[in-house]
């Protein structure tokens, strides 16, 4: 029981503490590719600490819902970190709280709360970003759900930890249905984490989706929303790595759990490298073309689902 | 006991003619008794009684503060409730039909008395009676095969097919979406009437299908058809809800979306992939009925607290309690945990994909495509609910207090608590993993056969964990030091707002072919509900064709009538020879 407890703590704390690092690394690499020295890989941490100390300015239209919902959004990502295999490959404490689909619904809950509390600022610009985020949700949410079910239809259970057992059969990862689901999920990861070719982080208002939602925030709520964003990127990316792309090499036991943080770091460098190549070689899509991008991901995930039942019929 | 309940409702009707508040109060008390009656029933039908009773209770209380529509709304409102009570508790086909008509006619009168246009009430009545004809036909066939007016087991599935399509029209299922949204939106139905029209009247229809389904033999093909129709209803109605500019029209479309979900779950039951999945699907039907009916009542109440009809031009009184209640209701309707709506969405998708897995054949593609379309619909539903709650409570408005806001806020918390009580609805699917910190009784599992667990969920733990971690986060990082300031609105005049209409414009443009979006001058025009446009076009063409036919060949010419008689004689002779 104590070992499970420690493994749980390592996974949750690992997600919370390590997640900003990967954004720092990607930003540093992007700067290097552009022949700039770039900021420190620890810059996201510096930003968070700076924001935590700052005063919070709040719109006169907003109530405490606007101020405290970021705490709930942050907590929702902590809950998700307990239920999917993002560090440790076996079920930990409270893992049965939700299955894969339940995890997808929790991501949707965090997204819903983020939009609603942003709208409370009463800012027209935030409303524009919210409208964009809401408009693309029909393809984003559905792809997340169908991709997760793609795993369920292959394995016969909606429990994501089953992938650890399937990792013993490498040829399963070369099956067409699995490859299609992986590509679909990777495309979704690019969308959900606001990466090119879907969205370019920065102040380019014409293409803003997710960044517009935090426009009116400052101080601690902004720090938590940004931190939550890093956690979301880590959670989705780690599911991509541990369930779809590279499930191998994970260690068991308390010491193994600590090693897993390092193993995940290596896996993440691989994912960040792919993201870097895409980010530095592709142009941003026009806003309405994002729908086409997501539609391709959705169709790939449905094709994967259909193949998984028809192939083995 | 049931006759006592009827009597109390009748008394409420009479009292409401003279003093409507007393009438509504007695109706609320009677609804509590009806809920108790549902609890004593102890089977699946009892759940429908509990849901209906709760909706009537909340709507009656709300009506006390809401009804400023003159003396006739209250008796008609309570009469409609009486009709639903009779239909729900009917033991015979005749009682059911009597209840069905007592429910429908006052609703027609409510829409007719509060009309801005004549057509919505007639359309409501027209489609309502079309549905009655089909239900009547199905019941007659059931009677001829069973020789009984009582709801008894049948050895043919034909009555089930006929009544199902009758009930589907009443539920506003694709392509009959107009039955639901037009009377509520264009008919300008009052918010309290809209709540029962949308929440329980369609629930009676779903109850009717379930009742006949449990009495009829298995018919998997109908199940697949219903599953598909349900899925497409969800997709289109959620899409139309999102682009709808009418405060109640949006909710009416959302009702169709929920009815589509209930129909899909009914479809899963009818296909009967395994006994375990069928039992699970029955629980899904009840859970969805709970989630939809109660939350929709609260959302219609929100529509009753605002002034105006167009979402972009509403006058809003808002407060924090109202916002929290509204957000809870909207999140449940978006299918999000830990509310009961989240449990309902999770269980529906699980049942569909379990079916796909267990069949593992080309037939699986039906449940996969239905599940995928539903997943897309859920995305639109979330967007629609975000838009609705933003423009009725959250985005702008004047801060104030109102008893009406308090009532729907209470319903919001009820919806949240119902999520954690949903274990009661899945009694055969309760589980626990004490070794991982969740004791027995706190997990709902989805199984495709005994012992074969597909997925699991613990709404209570989701709620508790989010609350605990939020408090921990607050404890660790502390409260922020807050300073209020005006919002920077990009240099435009503060009075100019990002409207609700603009909120859905991305979709209007991105799905312009599907929505028939046109840009005329400076404005966008969208055809909401193309199915109604097509039906309307066909009806107009038919009328014009009939008129031409009548003028040309039925113009009182004796020669033509002799030709008709000869043709009829030949036709009958041929039929007699063949048969």
Image: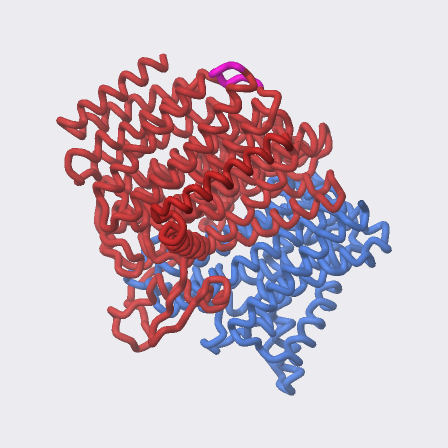
- Residue B81's image quarter? top left
Q: Quadrant of residue B155?
A: top right
- Residue for point 60% across, 63% down: A295
Which region shows up in magenta?
A: B147-153
Q: Is B497 situated above or below B537?
A: below
Residue pictured at 39% horizontal, 54% vertical: B552
Query: Which chain is in red here?
Result: B
Chain A: colour as depicted: blue
Q: Quadrant of the N terminus of chain B?
A: top left
Up the image or down, B487 lies above or below B110; here it is below
Q: Is residue B487 left or right of residue B233?
A: left
Judging from the image, the colouring scheme is by chain
Q: Nearer the viewer, residue A241 or B225?
A: B225
Residue drawn at 45 percent across, 56 percent down = B534
Residue B148 lies within the magenta run: yes
Give the image location of residue B297, x and y in percent: 35, 39
- Could one spot residue A291 in this view of the protein? yes
């Amino acid at each position: 029981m104590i070992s499970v407890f420690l493994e749980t703590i390592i996974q949750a704390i690992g997600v919370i503490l390590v997640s900003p690092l990967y954004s720092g690394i990607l930003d540093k690499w992007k700067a290097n590719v552009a022949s700039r020295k770039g900021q420190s890989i620890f810059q996201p941490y510096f930003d968070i600490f700076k924001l935590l100390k700052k005063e919070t300015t709040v719109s006169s239209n907003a109530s405490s819902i606007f101020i405290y919902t970021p705490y709930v959004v942050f907590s929702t990502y902590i809950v998700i970190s307990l239920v999917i295999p993002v560090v440790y490959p076996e079920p930990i404490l409270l893992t049965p709280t939700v299955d894969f689909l339940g995890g997808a619904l929790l991501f949707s809950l965090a997204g819903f709360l983020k939009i609603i509390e942003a709208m409370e600022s009463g800012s027209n610009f935030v409303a524009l970003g919210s409208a964009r985020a809401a408009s693309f949700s029909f393809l984003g949410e559905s792809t997340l759900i169908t991709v997760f079910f793609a795993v369920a239809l292959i394995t016969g259970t909606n429990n994501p930890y089953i992938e650890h057992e399937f990792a013993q059969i490498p040829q399963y990862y070369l099956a067409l249905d699995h490859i299609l689901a992986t590509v679909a999920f990777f495309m979704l990861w690019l969308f959900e984490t606001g990466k090119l070719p879907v969205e370019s982080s920065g102040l380019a208002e014409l293409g803003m989706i997710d960044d517009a939602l935090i426009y009116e925030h400052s101080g601690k709520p902004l720090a938590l929303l940004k931190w939550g964003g890093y956690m979301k990127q880590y959670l989705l990316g780690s599911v991509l790595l541990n369930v779809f792309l590279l499930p191998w090499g994970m260690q068991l036991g308390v010491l193994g759990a600590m090693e897993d943080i390092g193993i995940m770091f290596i896996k993440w460098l691989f994912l960040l490298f792919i993201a870097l190549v895409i980010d530095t070689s592709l142009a941003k899509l026009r806003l309405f073309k994002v729908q086409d991008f997501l539609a391709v991901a959705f169709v790939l995930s449905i094709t994967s689902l259909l193949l998984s039942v028809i192939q083995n019929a | 006991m049931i006759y006592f309940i009827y009597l109390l409702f009748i008394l409420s009707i009479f009292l409401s003619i003279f003093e409507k508040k007393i009438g509504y109060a007695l109706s609320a008390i009677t609804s509590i008794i009806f809920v108790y009656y549902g609890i004593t029933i102890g089977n699946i039908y009892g759940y429908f009684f509990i849901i209906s009773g709760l909706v009537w209770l909340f709507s009656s209380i709300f009506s006390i503060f809401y009804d400023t529509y003159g003396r006739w709304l209250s008796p008609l409102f309570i009469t409609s409730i009486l009709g639903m009570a009779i239909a729900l508790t009917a033991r015979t086909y005749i009682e059911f039909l009597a209840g069905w008509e007592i429910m429908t006619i006052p609703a027609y009168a409510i829409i007719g008395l509060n009309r801005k246009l004549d057509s919505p009430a007639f359309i409501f009545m027209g489609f309502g009676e079309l549905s009655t004809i089909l239900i009547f036909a199905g019941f007659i066939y059931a009677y001829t095969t069973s020789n009984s007016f009582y709801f008894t087991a049948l050895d043919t599935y034909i009555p089930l097919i006929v009544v199902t399509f009758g009930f589907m029209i009443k539920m506003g299922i694709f392509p009959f979406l107009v039955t639901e949204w037009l009377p509520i939106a264009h008919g300008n139905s009052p918010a309290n009437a809209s709540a029962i029209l949308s929440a329980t009247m369609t629930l009676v229809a779903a109850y009717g299908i379930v009742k006949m389904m449990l009495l009829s033999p298995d018919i998997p093909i109908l199940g697949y058809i219903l599953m598909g129709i349900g899925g497409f209803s969800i997709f289109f109605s959620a899409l139309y809800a999102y682009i709808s500019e009418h405060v109640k029209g949006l909710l009416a479309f959302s009702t169709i979306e929920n009815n589509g979900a209930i129909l899909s779950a009914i479809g899963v039951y009818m296909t009967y992939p395994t006994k375990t999945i069928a039992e699970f699907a029955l629980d899904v039907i009840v859970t969805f009925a709970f989630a939809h009916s109660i939350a929709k009542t609260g959302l219609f109440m929100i529509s009753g607290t605002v002034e105006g009809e167009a979402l972009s031009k509403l006058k809003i009184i808002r407060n924090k309690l109202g916002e929290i209640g509204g957000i809870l209701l909207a999140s449940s309707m978006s299918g999000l945990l830990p509310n009961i709506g989240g449990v309902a969405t999770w269980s529906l998708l699980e049942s569909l994909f379990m079916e796909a897995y267990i069949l593992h054949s080309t037939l699986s593609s039906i449940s996969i495509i239905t599940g995928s379309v539903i997943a897309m619909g859920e995305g639109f539903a979330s967007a629609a609910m975000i838009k609705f709650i933003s423009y009725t409570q959250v985005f702008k408005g004047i801060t104030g207090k109102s008893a009406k806001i308090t009532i729907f806020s209470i319903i919001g918390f009820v919806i949240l608590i119902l999520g954690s009580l949903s274990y009661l609805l899945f009694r055969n699917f309760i589980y626990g993993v004490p070794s991982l910190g969740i004791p027995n009784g706190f997990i709902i599992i989805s199984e495709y056969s005994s012992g074969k667990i597909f997925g699991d969920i613990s709404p209570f733990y989701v709620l508790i964990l989010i609350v605990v971690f939020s408090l921990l986060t607050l404890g660790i990082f502390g409260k922020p030091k807050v300073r209020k300031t005006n919002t920077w609105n990009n240099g435009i005049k503060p009075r100019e707002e990002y409207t609700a209409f603009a909120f859905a414009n991305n979709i209007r443009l991105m799905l312009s072919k599907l929505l028939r979006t046109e840009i005329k001058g400076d404005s966008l025009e969208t055809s909401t509900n193309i199915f109604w446009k097509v039906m309307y076009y066909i009806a107009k063409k038919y009328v014009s064709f009939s008129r031409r036919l009548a003028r040309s060949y039925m113009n009182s010419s004796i020669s033509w009538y002799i030709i008709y008689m000869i043709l009829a004689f030949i036709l009958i002779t041929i039929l007699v020879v063949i048969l």
